[in-house]
Image: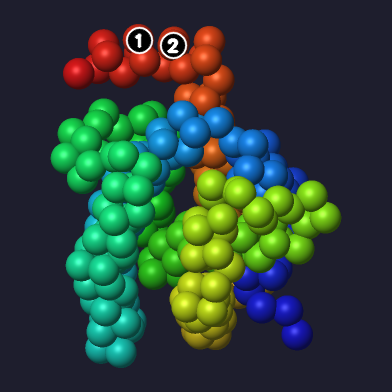
Amino acid sequence: MSTLFERLREGAATDWRAYVAHPFVDGLARGTLPEAAFRHYLVQDYLFLIHFGRAYALAVVKADDLAGMRSAAATLDALINGEMKLHVEFAARWGISAEEMEQAPEAPECMAYTRYVLDRGLSGDILDLKVALAPCVVGYRDIAVAIKARSDFVEAGNPYLPWIEMYAGADYAAVADEAVAELDRLAATRATEARLPSLTRTFAEACRLEAGFWEMGWRAGTPAKASLWSRLTTRRK
């Protein structure tokens, strides 16, 4: 029997494919992604994590029971006191400080996805919120695992290998598997066949916004477009 995640992925196949097969992902796999693209992504991903934490704080409010509250609270703690620290350490290897990330202007693509997730959580229930988060939480595992299985995957000398191995590793696999299981637990009491089209639309929109996040980084790594991006963000400061 298919999991809810598998049904959502199948229902949003076109948008899922555009997300997981974006040129940014190809660049990670081959080690050809311009460094400027990855640096910009790292900065915006830090800002994304801040709002990701807010989404799990909202999950505490939206949870059905104490067990759900504890689970969301534990994830929130792991995010803001664990993963964000690891992100700072990882970014430091690329010469990016925590101060630089915190003071950076938030890209429209980051705003679009994070605010969409929060909106789905505020206007809907805990299942709407978790479905909106799923392309990120589960998708990064699936992307990294798929990269390592590619025939054109370049391992030796690939500057993005640590990122790939982190999301393809056993620790993150456990996080993704739990997210898939959580969707099924919530679906047992909250999902109906009549509701599936709405949930699929949420999942598809989140995939489109994730693809936009990749595009943001990809664009920043292209010299001509990066120059335009610099002018636009300077105006916002």
Label 2: how many Cα within 10 Å (few below 14, some 14–19, many 20+): few
Query: Residue at the location (56% across, 55% down)?
Result: 161
Q: Which numbered tag is attached to residue 231?
A: 1
Residue 224 appears at what percent x and percent y?
Answer: 53, 10
Question: Could you tell me which secondary element the residue under label 2 belongs to?
Answer: helix
- 82 to 190, vertically: above or below: above
- Whether residue 195 is visible here, answered yes or no, is no
Query: Residue at the location (27% across, 53% down)?
Result: 88
Q: Is residue 216 left or right of residue 62?
A: right
Label 1: how many Cα within 10 Å (few below 14, some 14–19, many 20+): few
Q: Which numbered tag is attached to residue 41?
A: none
- 207 to 79, vertically: above or below: above
Decide which of 120, 208 is in the foreground and name it: 208
Quarter of the picture holding the C terminus: top left
Numbered label tally: 2
Label 1 is placed on what type of residue? Arg
Q: Is residue 56 left or right of residue 180?
A: left
- Judging by the rendered image, the residue that carries numbered circle 2 is 227
Decide which of 40, 213 is in the foreground and name it: 40
Residue 190 appears at what percent x and percent y?
Answer: 50, 77
Disc 2/disc 1 C-alpha distance (Å): 6 Å
Decide which of 189, 24 is in the foreground and name it: 24
Query: Residue at the location (70% across, 62% down)?
Result: 148
Label 2 is placed on what type of residue? Ser
Question: Could you tell me which secondary element the residue under label 1 belongs to?
Answer: helix
Discs 2, 1 touching: Cβ within 8 Å: yes
- Whether residue 164 is visible here, answered yes or no, is yes
Q: Quadrant of residue 80?
A: bottom left
Residue 207 appears at what percent x and percent y?
Answer: 58, 48
Query: Residue at the location (63% across, 74% down)?
Result: 4
